[in-house]
Image (cartoon, rainbow, N blue to C red):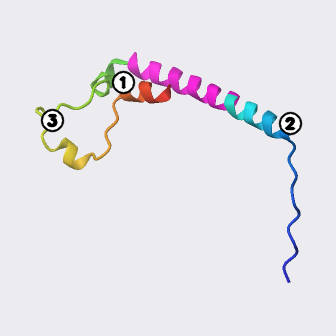
């Protein structure tokens, strides 16, 4: 036989605190991503990834890569 699950009661104050903690965690995560992305953008060996691939230069690229994402687009999406 399965035991009945206990009902968990969360107060509005607890909900608000959890929401604020989540917002702060997201803020910290975005800052970490921005720092990492900044390091990539400042490293010459990753400059090839700054802009989208030009289909004129690589005609089959978009046949192979269905959801491309350059570093510039990553920076936009982080915000």
**Relative to 5, 53 lies left or right:** left
Vertical placement of 77 versus 7: above or below?
above
Residue depicted at x 15% and y 44%: 60
The front one of 1 and 43 is 1
Q: Nearer the viewer, mark 2 or mark 3?
A: 2
Vertical placement of 65 versus 37: above or below?
below
Rate crowding at label 2 as few (under 14), some (14 to 19) or many (20 or more) other CA atoms within 10 Å: few
Residue depicted at x 22% and y 32%: 53
Instruction: Using the rendered view, name the quadrant where residue 5 is placed.
Output: bottom right
Asked if residue 28 is among those painted magenta in the image, a careful observer would answer yes
Q: Secondary structure at mark 3?
A: loop
- Counting residues from the start of the chain, the first of labels 2 and 3 encountered is 2
Which span of residues is magenta-colored?
A: 24-42
**Relative to 3, 72 lies left or right:** left
User: Distance of mark 2 from mark 3, alpha carbons?
Assistant: 53 Å
- Counting residues from the start of the chain, the first of labels 1 and 2 encountered is 2
**Relative to 15, 47 lies left or right:** left
Q: Which residue is mark 3?
A: 55
Instruction: Using the rendered view, name the quadrant where residue 18 is placed.
Output: top right
Chief SS of the magenta region: helix
Q: Which residue is mark 1?
A: 72
Asked if residue 8 is among those painted magenta in the image, a careful observer would answer no
């Amino acid at each position: 036989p399965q035991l009945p699950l206990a009902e968990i009661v969360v107060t509005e104050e607890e909900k608000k605190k959890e929401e604020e903690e989540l917002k702060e965690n997201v803020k910290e995560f975005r800052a970490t991503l921005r720092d990492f992305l900044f390091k990539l953008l400042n490293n010459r060996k990753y400059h090839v990834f700054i802009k989208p691939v030009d289909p004129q230069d690589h005609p089959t690229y978009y046949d192979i890569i269905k959801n491309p994402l350059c570093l510039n687009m990553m920076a936009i999406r982080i915000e």
